[in-house]
Image: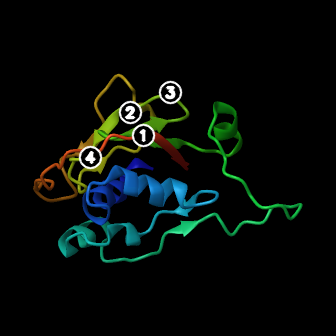
Amino acid sequence: MPSHHLPLLLAAYQYKFGRDIEAMCRHLIDDVAVGWDELGTDLLDDAPPALVAALTGGEHWPSRTLDHLVTPDGSPPVRMSVTDETANEQDTEWGYVLHKEGIEVISLRHEDIGPIVSWSIDPCTAFNDHPAAWSSLDSPPTVRASRGRRPRSAPAAAPAKAGPSRRTARR
């Protein structure tokens, strides 16, 4: 859901990966054989403690990949490509595409494309989780300005490195 994944991904880009989209793509996409079961607070490494506390409520959990899966016939699992058919079969609701300018959030039940959330957005922004709110024709939907406090400025944007768009899907 955007309210969980976007804050982690925005903070990871801004702090853990030092605004290096290629490093983030390698970690999240290239370095895993199958995909992600859960994005954890380890993505918040190097983020200010106050931001980590605001995003996690003081809880910590590890990221977990699906690389340990075993198929029924014993063959190694393979990475799933998300199509309309596989999204429905796997009950996948959300897609996240990493672009040099931000994260495209796709409500897979409604559209094949979505609005792009800028990398410079404050990770404490509260995002709407209603799938119909994520229209490709509208700005990214927020529920309120921030999670119960005045918005703070995001770190100054560094020039983004050009690179190919990458896709990773989550439920």
Foreground mark, 3 or 1?
A: 3
Residue type, label 2 = Ala
Q: Earlier in the sequence, mark 4 or mark 3?
A: 3
| Percent of width and height locating residue 37 | 57, 62
| Disc 2 secondary structure class | helix
**Cα distance between the residues tagged 3 and 2:** 11 Å
Give the Cα distance between marks 2 and 1.
Answer: 6 Å
Label whose residue precedes the other's in the sequence (3 or 2): 3
N-terminal of the pair, mark 4 or mark 1, is 4
**Circle nearer the N terminus (4, 2):** 4
**144 or 82, which is in the foreground?**
82
Marks 4 and 1 in Cβ contact (< 8 Å) = no
Q: Which x, y percent locates residue 130?
A: 42, 40
Task: Identify the amino acid type marked 3.
Answer: Glu
Residue behind mark 4: 119
Helix, strand or loop at disc 1? loop
Q: Earlier in the sequence, mark 3 or mark 1?
A: 3
Circle number at residue 130: 1
State the residue lying farthest toward the front: 162
Q: Is residue 15 left or right of residue 86?
A: left
Q: Is residue 125 left or right of residue 111?
A: left
- Mark 3 or 2, which is nearer the eye? 3
Tell me the element at label 4.
Answer: loop
Q: Which residue bears the numbered disc 2?
A: 133
Q: Position of residue 19 (x, y in %)?
A: 26, 54
Element type where label 3 sits in the image:
loop
Indicate which disc residue 111 carries: 3
Looking at the picture, which amino acid does disc 1 mark?
A: His
* Label 2 environment density (alpha carbons within 10 Å; few <14, some 14–19, many ≥20): some
Which residue occupies 28% across, 30% down?
139
- Nearer the observer, disc 4 or disc 1? 4
